[in-house]
Amino acid sequence: MTNIYLAGPFFDDEQIERIERVEKALAANPKIGHVFSPRLDEIPGLTMGTPEWATQTFQMDVSQIDKADVVVALSDFVDDQVDSGTAFEIGYAFHSKKPIVLLHEKKTILNLMLAESLHAHLTDAADLATYDFSTLPESHYEGKVI
């Protein structure tokens, strides 16, 4: 069973709705053992924005990427720009040689660093429910890059 780290922004209603759809799709996939979603796995008792919260959250998230078999990342943020935290998680995962399954639902141009780092490119969150995380079929982004 594959362990997943879910990277993606959850700062406004649209992003929360998207990440919730992804969480549900991943939960429905029988090839997945565990999904770590920073949105759902906050450290209890810490106040968001404090230095203690920032340090512990950073350390927890990096540790969870290290434990994951695959990183599922959401590239959609604002127009062609990816969330900076998500970009860090993708870069860290790539450097750690973790396969990256990138969900790119909006019709935007993808940054070349994301396009070149991914293992699989998906355009519909529902596809995550049936994606074979045990064999990890490859698919590449074919659009323009910036």
Image (tube, rainbow, N blue to C red):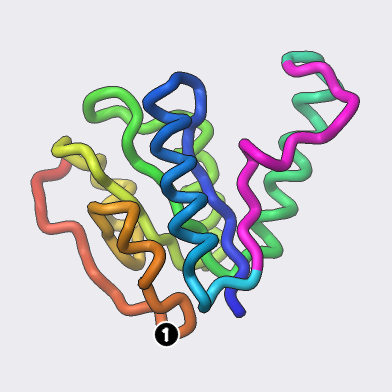
The location of residue 2, given as percent across then percent down, is 58, 74
Report whether residue 71 is seen. yes
Is 25 situated above or below 37?
A: below
Dot 1 alpha-carbon crowd within 10 angstroms: few under 14, some 14 to 19, many 20 or more: few
Taking the image as shown, residue 104 lies to the left or right of residue 85, namely: left
Q: Residue at x 49, y 60 (%)?
A: 26
Q: Residue at x 38, y 62 (%)?
A: 128
Q: Quadrant of the N terminus?
A: bottom right
Is 98 situated above or below 23?
A: below
Is-magenta flag for residue 46? yes
**Viewer-nearest residue: 127 or 138:** 127
Q: Residue at x 32, y 79 (%)?
A: 137
Q: Residue at x 56, y 72 (%)?
A: 32
Q: Quadrant of the C terminus?
A: top left
Q: Quadrant of residue 138?
A: bottom left
Is-magenta flag for residue 57? no
Q: How many marks?
A: 1
Is 35 situated above or below 9?
A: below
SS at mark 1 in the image: loop
Report whether residue 94 is seen. no
The location of residue 49, given as percent across then percent down, is 73, 14
The location of residue 93, given as percent across then percent down, is 53, 56
Q: Amino acid at mark 1?
A: Thr
Taking the image as shown, residue 96 lies to the left or right of residue 109, namely: right
Q: Main secondary structure of the magenta part?
A: loop
The stretch of residues the image draws in magenta is 34-48
| Residue denoted by label 1 | 135
